[in-house]
Amino acid sequence: MALIFYSPINPADVWEAELKKHLPELDFRRWEAPGDKSEIDMALCWKPPPGGLAKFPNLKVIFSLAAGIDSLTADPALPDVPIVRMVEPSLTAGVAEYVLLHVLRHHKDQPRFAEQQKARIWQEHFAPPAWTRRVGLLGLGAIGAEAARMLVAVGFEVAGWSRTQKHLADVTSYFGPDQLDGFLARSDILVCLLPKTRQTDGILNAALFAKLPQGASLINAGRGDQLIEDDLLAALDSGQLSQATLDVFATEPLPPAHPFWAHPRITVTPHSAGDPFAASAARVVAENIRRFRAGQPLPHLYDRKAGY
Ligand code: NDP
Ligand code: OXD
């Protein structure tokens, strides 16, 4: 039996070589040359064309190249097989580093200094110490927990909001819809690391922004559909929000005419907060393939009921 690979961004030759270091016998097939489709029982992919995976009649498992599996589950013809999310050290660390970088930029008012530099303005602004800055993480899962750990190490006052209660060192846990408002009221820098689900779509909206301290800032590395774009622009205009850093968008690539590109208080990055580095992630995927072949339980399975 064989594995079919598809990704518009992850190079197939690199992934084949890295996987074969751990599984030399692996029958690795590329999307453009799948051979006999009935021999494919595993898929490793990111954003496959809709309906594409339905063409493999004996598919038994999907290994996602991404942590978020919404691009897979958006396919109405997706085979009803287990989906293993990508949870591996380089992706987790990469997104957590992104969060740390942009929290520090917001904390130290770096976008304002960048604007001042363009205009050759020499003006100091004093940032309070990190331990007085309250960072709030929406989503305290595999990535949120690591981002929290890094932020705590720098000295920020960190809280997270999740569906279920967490017990992480020096991180205040808020959970469930009832505790969202209390979490927001204490979040000077709000970071979104939520998966895209029916419950989280549109969660970053005017009502939520109004519950943050005035002048709070936003970092969204979750999914673009979680943000109501016009509400963000209005909150920046009114001063309710001071700045935003966005890595994910409802339409990707972000269209050239989109107002976010030129907004003085929005930083845009092209869905690049983190990616699985093949040499690291292939080790995890290979182990999951071994587990699948041995009929052992698979980790980080997509939970259809929870939606992530
Ligand atoms: P996890 O599933 O490990 O964590 C998700 C977190 O969100 C959990 O803490 C979960 O709560 C919480 N959550 C989900 N739904 C709700 C809800 N309705 N209310 C409150 N909390 C909720 O995922 P990862 O940490 O691995 O990844 C998170 C997301 O980050 C991905 O789905 C993807 O969208 C995004 N991502 C973005 C990347 C980028 O490059 N921009 C790269 C990688 C990921 P609980 O713990 O209780 O289950
Ligand atoms: C994602 C990823 O889910 O890159 O965005 O892993």
Image: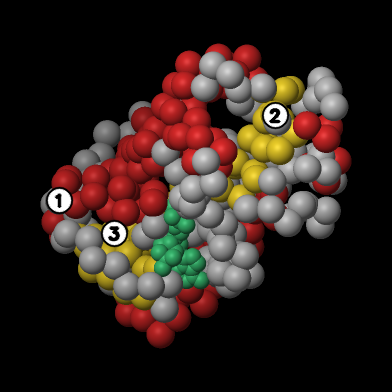
Residue 90 lies, with reference to residue 220, above or below; the image says above
Comparing marks 3 and 2, which lies closer to the viewer?
Answer: 2
Q: Secondary structure at mark 3?
A: strand
Label ID, residue 234? none
> Which is nearer the N-term, disc 3 or disc 2?
2
Q: In the image, what residue type sits under mark 2? A: Ala
The furthest residue to the bottom: 178
Residue 271 figure quarter: top right
Q: Which residue is mark 3?
A: 135
> Which is nearer the N-term, disc 3 or disc 1?
3
Q: How far across and down, in percent of the image, does residue 41 sit?
A: 71, 38
Comparing marks 1 and 2, which lies closer to the viewer?
Answer: 2
Q: Which residue is mark 2?
A: 2
Residue 45 lies, with reference to residue 108, above or below; the image says above
User: Is disc 3 surrounded by few (<14), some (14 to 19) or many (20+) residues within 10 Å?
Assistant: many
> Which is nearer the N-term, disc 1 or disc 2?
2
Residue 177 figure quarter: bottom left
Name the side, left or right, on which 158 lies relative to 17: left
The residue under the point 49% across, 48% down is 296
Q: Is residue 11 shown to the viewer in this render?
A: no
The residue under the point 39% across, 33% down is 90
Q: Which residue is mark 1?
A: 155
Q: In the image, what residue type sits under mark 1? A: Gly
Name the side, left or right, on which 195 lies relative to 187: right
Instruction: Decide which of 47, 113 is in the foreground and name it.
Output: 47
- Is the residue under label 2 in contact with that under label 1 (CB below 8 Å)? no
What is the distance, in whole Å, between disc 1 and disc 2 at their CAs?
A: 48 Å
Q: Secondary structure at mark 1?
A: loop
